[in-house]
Image (tube, rainbow, N blue to C red):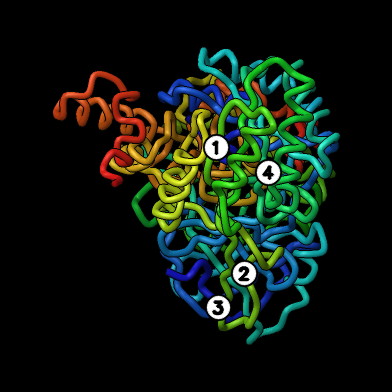
Amino acid sequence: MLASGILNETGKSMLEVARAGAGAIVTKSLGIAERSGHPNPCIAEIECGLLNAMGLPNPGVKAYADDIKEAKAGGVPVFGSAIGGSPEEIAEVAVALSAAGVDAVELNLSCPHAKGYGVEIGSSPEKVREVCGGVKSMIDIPVFAKLTPNTSSIASLASAAEEGGADGIVAINTLKGMTICPELKMPVLSNRIGGLSGPAIRSVGVRCVFEIFEAVNIPVIGVGGISTARDALEYIMAGAQAVQIGTAIRSQGTAVFADVCVGLSDFMSENGYKSVSDMVGVAHVADT
Amino acid sequence: MPTHRILAITGQTDEAPDCRTVRLDGAMDAQPGQFVMVWVPGRDEFPMSVSYIGDNFGVTYRIVGNGTRSLSAMNPGDKIGIRGPYGRGFEITGRRMLAIAGGTGMASIAPLVEKAVESGVEVDLALGAKTAPELIMRGRCEEAGAKVHVSTDDGSAGMKGLATDIAAKVLDGGDFDSVCACGPERMTTGVLDLAQKRGLPLQASLERYMKCGIGVCDSCAIDGKHVCVDGPVFSREVLASLTDLGRTRLSISGRRVPLD
């Protein structure tokens, strides 16, 4: 799946990603109102990843409806990513996304770089439960909660989402980070703090999915630093039923989706697995 | 790998009213047409064409907002951040090239003209601007050995008309096998039309608002292509396939708006 925040500001870009082999597409995070995001620089290229503080730029969910339609032409499920400053606002966005024709909603309860949005709601289990419950009462399509690793217990957030009625969990969003330019004596990002993605966070994501898998009975989608089939296998064996890819597009382009799928098939035939579900969570078997 | 190279400004020169070139204490190995992200500390970061390649490299910019105004007020010794070069530049092909530049589009055409002449290509340049003072880097291209044809919207220099008008005239008078263009999008759509009608290979550079510059954020998307990594220089075939060309762009929030 294409992860939210990457190549998904426009319908045609999402269509290209679907054609490149992604099994599903997640949209850019959308709110009720238009947002410009943070001023540039909003991205810093660092070792093993990217640090970004885009600040959730989006044209507003209503202006994005045509892009959803265009993306749907790719023939794969489209997940609409919702943001909001309150549980009511998030539910309103989810309703609008559903009306625009998305196949599922992903609640972004975990953006680390936009004040009042995402992680400020998503770091309390009570709020996560409330938001999931509110959204579930308004729409009929599946609801996924995308959770933050910037917490002492992501498993309790996942349990709260399950209690609220979420149909699945997406983990993880970016890790809070900062990079400073020594010559200029200042943080590079205009927002100072950003979210770290890419290979640097993969082992954190795998650990989070592993913990969530043990805490809940709903499906988990793994995301964070996946660029090869082997990376995807780590998430799958930790308990993910599907995986999302974002930052790897920077170095590998959209070909990364087909490459990972081919690598997974090769691994499965070499090791006698008939389907991906035969591999989900198998790393837990070794537990005593 | 630090995210930006921090370089000192060695000097700034006025090219035209509201158009300046900043030279930096560093080298840039880039193709003509490629761009860099320029970070004005504490203000903004924006994409700019590399107008001087190699040692003491430079970028040429129009003063259009607070960020570029701050840059224009910076002095020798002040430091800015650079990342790049990014994107696909111009490829030098054929034996006789018509380069077409409109206004500050010369920032990427001037180094192309120099490199093309150096590689043995015979180059004509059609250079257009609104008024005579806005014709930039003309002497530079003449010195390089290009035959320069000038037009201005108001007739204050050269032929009265648009860059596409003078370009059409030059194309009719010569046997060209390559056309390269950079200018406002109205000009680019006109140039595309000229190249399509004549069946000539065309490469033209596009401009869009950018955030990441590295092909992930989608803010410079045009019909599923990305100006930062698939461009800024696109082929005639790609340009002809773009339904947004000359019509719409994305705003800072990602809203589709009419092209200015």
Residue at screen point 45% across, 43% down: A209
Q: Are marks 4 and 3 on the same chain?
A: no
The amino acid type found where label 2 is placed reads Val
Residue position marked by numbered label 4 in the rendering:
A109
Residue position marked by numbered label 2 in the rendering:
A188
> Residue A203: x and y, percent?
39, 54
Counting other residues with Cα less than 10 Å from the Cα at mark 2, is it few (<14), some (14-19), or many (20 or more)? Answer: many
The amino acid type found where label 3 is placed reads Leu
Q: Nearer the viewer, mark 1 or mark 2?
A: 1
The quadrant in which residue B118 appears is bottom left
Please tell me whether mark 1 sits on a helix, a strand or a loop.
Answer: strand
Q: Are marks 1 and 4 on the same chain?
A: yes
Asked if marks 4 and 3 touch (Cβ < 8 Å), the reply is no
What chain is tagged by disc 4? A
Which quadrant would the C terminus of chain B be assigned to in this image? top right
Residue position marked by numbered label 3 in the rendering:
B7
Q: Nearer the viewer, mark 2 or mark 4?
A: 4
A21 up-or-down from B118: above or below: above
Mark nearer the N terminus (2 vs 4): 4
| Relative horizontal placement of residue B48, taking residue B143 as reference (left or right) | right
Specify whether residue A87 is in view.
Answer: yes
The amino acid type found where label 4 is placed reads Leu
Furthest-front residue in view? A288
> Residue B145: x and y, percent?
47, 57
Counting other residues with Cα less than 10 Å from the Cα at mark 3, is it few (<14), some (14-19), or many (20 or more)? Answer: some
Asked if marks 3 and 1 touch (Cβ < 8 Å), the reply is no
Residue at screen point 80% across, 62% down: B18
